[in-house]
Image (cartoon, rainbow, N blue to C red):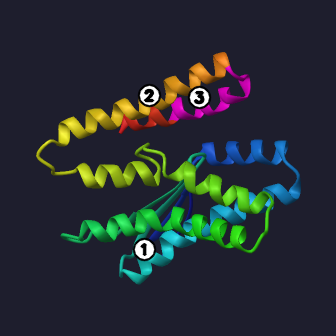
């Protein structure tokens, strides 16, 4: 479903985004929901501001239950360092907010959510910033095929570990296993 198209920018909202939001609103109070969306907004602002500072125009934005995917205008031979900087900027902003709040002696949901947003987005799945960075670093390398297999093995290892933890330690880990499995299957489809 396309929501907005203006000045060459297209914004698309996937049904999974609406479903995810419904679950968030059902499970949390208003303050936690506000803190969650604020942490997400500063994360995405980090990507957008960095892209703008590096002269990269955002062409398309897609909101899904797994986050936001931005597509930049095609630029011939854009240095890999720019792409990595844009991908790393979101988690970096979240970590910066977490660090500043820690140093200031603050605590709370917003601080925790910023750390969680950074760590989640640095996971090695292709649809997340960490996986995108790994893919950029592997692309065109002499042993790219080996790197890709190791990357896939890492993602499968995370899912298996979470399944074992859910079975042995606590069923509360089960949603994390399901999320890792969905992310893994999403990567396989690409």
Mark number for residue 145? none
Decide if residue 3 is on the left or right side of residue 130.
Answer: right
**Residue at left offset 84%, top offset 47%:** 28
* 187 lies above or below 169: below
Front residue of 186/174: it is 174
**Part of the protein shown in magenta:** 169-182
> Mark 2 or mark 3, which is nearer to you?
2
Callout 3 crowding tier (Cα within 10 Å): few <14, some 14–19, many ≥20: many
Q: Residue 174: x, y in percent?
A: 66, 26
Residue contact between numbered discs 2 and 3, judged by CB atoms under 8 Å: no
Residue contact between numbered discs 1 and 2, judged by CB atoms under 8 Å: no
Front residue of 172/168: it is 168
Q: Which residue is mark 1?
A: 8
Say which element carries label 1: loop
Work out whether mark 1 precedes mark 2 in sequence or the reverse, and give the earlier one. 1
Q: Which residue is mark 3?
A: 177
Decide if residue 36 is on the left or right side of residue 81.
Answer: right
Mark 1 and mark 3: Cα distance apart in space: 38 Å
> Mark 1 or mark 3, which is nearer to you?
3
Residue 45 within the magenta-colored segment of the rendering: no
* 36 lies above or below 58: above
**Residue at left offset 50%, top offset 23%:** 160
Callout 2 crowding tier (Cα within 10 Å): few <14, some 14–19, many ≥20: few
* 124 lies above or below 172: below
Q: Quadrant of residue 88?
A: bottom left
Front residue of 58/39: it is 39
Q: Which residue is mark 2?
A: 157
């Amino acid at each position: 479903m396309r929501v907005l198209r203006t000045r060459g920018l297209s914004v698309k909202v996937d049904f999974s985004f609406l479903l995810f939001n419904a679950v968030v609103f059902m499970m949390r109070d208003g303050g936690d929901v506000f803190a969650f969306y604020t942490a997400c907004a500063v994360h995405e602002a980090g990507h957008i501001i960095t892209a703008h500072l590096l002269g990269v125009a955002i062409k398309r934005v897609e909101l899904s239950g797994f986050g936001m995917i931005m597509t930049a205008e095609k630029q011939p031979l854009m240095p890999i360092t720019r792409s990595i900087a844009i991908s790393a900027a979101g988690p970096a902003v979240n970590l910066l907010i977490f660090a500043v709040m820690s140093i200031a002696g603050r605590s709370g949901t917003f601080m925790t959510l910023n750390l969680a947003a950074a760590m989640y987005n640095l996971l090695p799945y292709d649809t997340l910033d960490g996986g995108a960075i790994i893919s950029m670093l592997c692309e065109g390398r002499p042993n790219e095929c080996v790197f890709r297999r190791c990357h896939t093995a890492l993602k499968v290892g995370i899912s298996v570990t979470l399944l074992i933890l859910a079975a042995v330690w606590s069923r509360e880990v089960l949603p994390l296993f399901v999320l890792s499995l969905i992310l893994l299957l999403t990567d396989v489809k690409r």
